[in-house]
Image (spheres, rainbow, N blue to C red):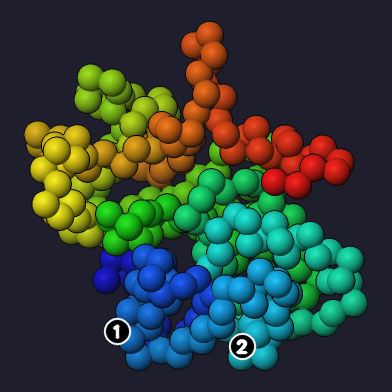
Amino acid sequence: MGSLQMNGFTRDDISLNWIPIDHVAGLIYFHIRDVYLGSRQIHFPLQLFLEEPLIWLDLIDRFRVSIAFGPNFAYSLVNDCADANLKRQWDLSSMKFFLNGAEVIVAKTARGFLQLLTPHRLAPTTMRPSWGMAEISSGVTFSNNFSLSSTTDNDLFVEVGAPIPGVDLRIVDDQNQVVAEEEIGTLQVKGLTVTSGYYQNQEVNQQAFTEDGWFNTGDWGLLKDGRLTITGRQKDAIIICGNNYYSHDIETAVEEVEGVEV
C-alpha cells in the first residue's frame, strides 16, 4: 500500500516484466501488486530479453505499457544497441515509470538510456531509481528527482528517494550510533515490510537485527532531507590506506576501456 500511495499506481496501469517470478521484484511488483490493483500484467522470458534487448521496447510500444523495471545492466544492454535503435520506430509516450534498482545505479547508464530514447517520445522524468531487498519485501524507496537536467554523467552516486509510508531509515556508524545528515554510514531499516527474521537461524538473526529492532541491510548510504543515496555494499568495497574504492565505480571505469566487456 505504501508503494501505491507514493507512486500513484492504479488499475489503469499496464506493467511489462521479464524478471523471473522467483525474484522478489518480479513477484511483488509485477505480479502481486497488479493482482491487488486488478491491472494488466504482461510477462516475457528473461532469456528472450538477454538475446534481444530491444524487444523490451517493441512490447512497450505494442501494448502501451506504463510501468517496467530493470537493473542497471538492462539499460546498459539497450544502450549497447544504439546503432540498431536508429533503424527502429517506437512510441514510448505511454511510459510513466522505468523503475531502476536491484543493483548499483550508474548515472551515466541511466542518462544514456533517456537520451537514446528521447526521439521515441520517452519523457525525461520516467527513470525512477529505487532501493529495496528481499528481506524488506522489495522496493521501499523511490526517487522522482532523476532527469537529464538534475544529473550528470560524472555523478558517483544516484539518489534513490524517500521511504514509502510505514518504513523508516537511519544511517549509523560502527558503534550503532546515528550519524549526521549527509554522512556515510551503515543503512538500517525498520517498518511494516521488514522480515521478522531468517527461518531457524538465530545466529544470523542476532547479526541482522539490533537490540532495538532495526534491520542491518549491509549497505552503505547517506540521508539528505529524508532521501536516501546508496554508496555501496559493505562487502563490495576495497579499502586501501583508509580510502574506500567501490566495485561499481571500478567496473564503470573498466567498461570504458576499448575491447573490455564486463
Query: Is residue 118 at all visible to an observer of this figure?
Result: no
Give the amino acid type for the residue marked by disc 2 in the picture.
Answer: Arg
Figure check: 90 above or below 146: below
Return the residue at label 2: 64
Q: Residue at x 28, y 56 (%)?
A: 136
Disc 2: CA contacts within 10 A as few (<14), some (14-19) or many (>=20): some
- Callout count: 2
Q: Is residue 204 left or right of residue 64?
A: left
**Disc 1 packing (10 Å; few <14; some 14–19; many ≥20):** few
The numbered dot on residue 36 is 1
On screen, 201 above or below 18? Answer: above
- Residue 5 at x, y percent in the picture: 33, 69
For badge 1, the amino acid type reads Tyr
Q: Position of residue 174 (x, y in %)?
A: 28, 21
Front residue of this view, candidates 71 and 130: 71
What is the spatial separation of the Cα atoms under label 2 and label 1, in whole angstroms? 21 Å
For the N terminus, give its image quadrant. Answer: bottom left
**Where, by quadrant of the figure, is residue 249 drawn?**
top right
User: Residue placed at 81% from the left, 65% from the top?
Assistant: 81
